[in-house]
Image (cartoon, grey):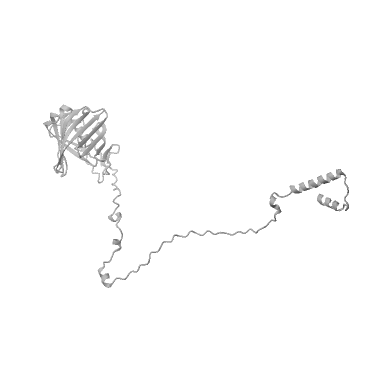
Amino acid sequence: MKVRYLAMHARALPANPLHLPRKHAALLVAGVWLLHMWLLAGMPLWFSPDAGKPLRTQALITRQIEIAAPRAPQVPQPAPTTTRPPTPSQAAEAPAESPESAKPLKFDDFGQDLTAPVSLPPRSATGVDLPPYKRPGSEGLTEVTTFKAPDSALLKYQVQGQAKGFHYWATAELNWTHSSTDYEARLEVSAFLLGSRVQVSTGTLGAEGLMPTRFGDKTRSEQAAHFQRDKGIISFSANSPDAPLLKGAQDRLSVVLQLSSLLAADPTRFPAGTMLSFQTVSQREAEVWQFLVEQEELLQLPFGEISAIKLNRKPRRAFDQQIELWFAPTLGYLPVRLRITNANGDFVDQLLSKADKPSP
């Protein structure tokens, strides 16, 4: 409105310019300046120094782009093969191929996966064992009434033997140590060019004499038997079936020291002709060994001349080993000689050469 008002008054001015007083001229200039400033303040913010250029408008064009689904990889098709029909003579000679023979053999074809572990039948809750748990009764097993562990000792032996017709010589060392509650027996046999074999029995001393908890047998690798008394079983690292744990059970090393302990406690209880029976455990199985007490003998050993009581485990089956043991009363009934003979005639004979106190 103010602009129009000023414009109207401007056209109404006479053609000849009027000489305005300075005061009025200054007011007029100030008014025009304020008018321009007001107009500039109302301009939009997108106004730019390039506003003098003519603006070009262009229609906004949109289009939809469709993404094509990925193509499946093309598998080259094999070249078609042409087969000629067999001649009548070839068709007569060629045997008919059954569908079973065309399939490759798998383990399942043999009835079961040969690499899968064989599951054992569960044990009966009524106490009657199912195969392969053929539990022999504890009847006939030697009952321990008196027991005296021999003093700890380090026994060294000279060994001679025969294996597959080859005679060899070796050395052996039995380190026997015990406290009032625990024991450890370690037997190592070493032979030149043949290496060594180590057997270790560890356990406790209790009402049954020596009570093994673990028996290990090592040549290149170790196999072991574990006496799980809380479960009443003997388990084996060689994947053999568990065996029932019988009263007074021993391993192949502890049984020697168990015999020493029984003889040391009361030798008069075991005169010649007495049979001693123990469940004896190797690294793979458990069976009952029976030892017959024989007469006392005078031995000539590398250790010297010494008197010893002989116990003999005679073979009961075709391939059983004969095991002969000699225990010297003057050495606390420690074993001074041990001889094992196989059914094929191979043997090993272990003769005492030195007896010392065990190394600390």
Q: Is residue 120 above or below residue 153?
A: below
Whether residue 7 is visible: yes
Name the foreground residue: 129 vs 226: 226
Residue 220: which quarter of the image?
top left
Whether residue 48 is visible: no
Name the foreground residue: 277 vs 17: 17
Q: Position of residue 226 (x, y in %)?
A: 27, 38
Q: Is residue 332 above or below residue 168?
A: above
Residue 86: which quarter of the image?
bottom left
Q: Position of residue 47 (x, y in %)?
A: 70, 50
Q: Position of residue 192 (x, y in %)?
A: 19, 38
Name the foreground residue: 114 vs 317: 114
Q: Quadrant of the C terminus?
A: top left
Q: Please count the marks in the image.
A: 0
Residue 341: which quarter of the image?
top left
Q: Position of residue 231 (x, y in %)?
A: 30, 39
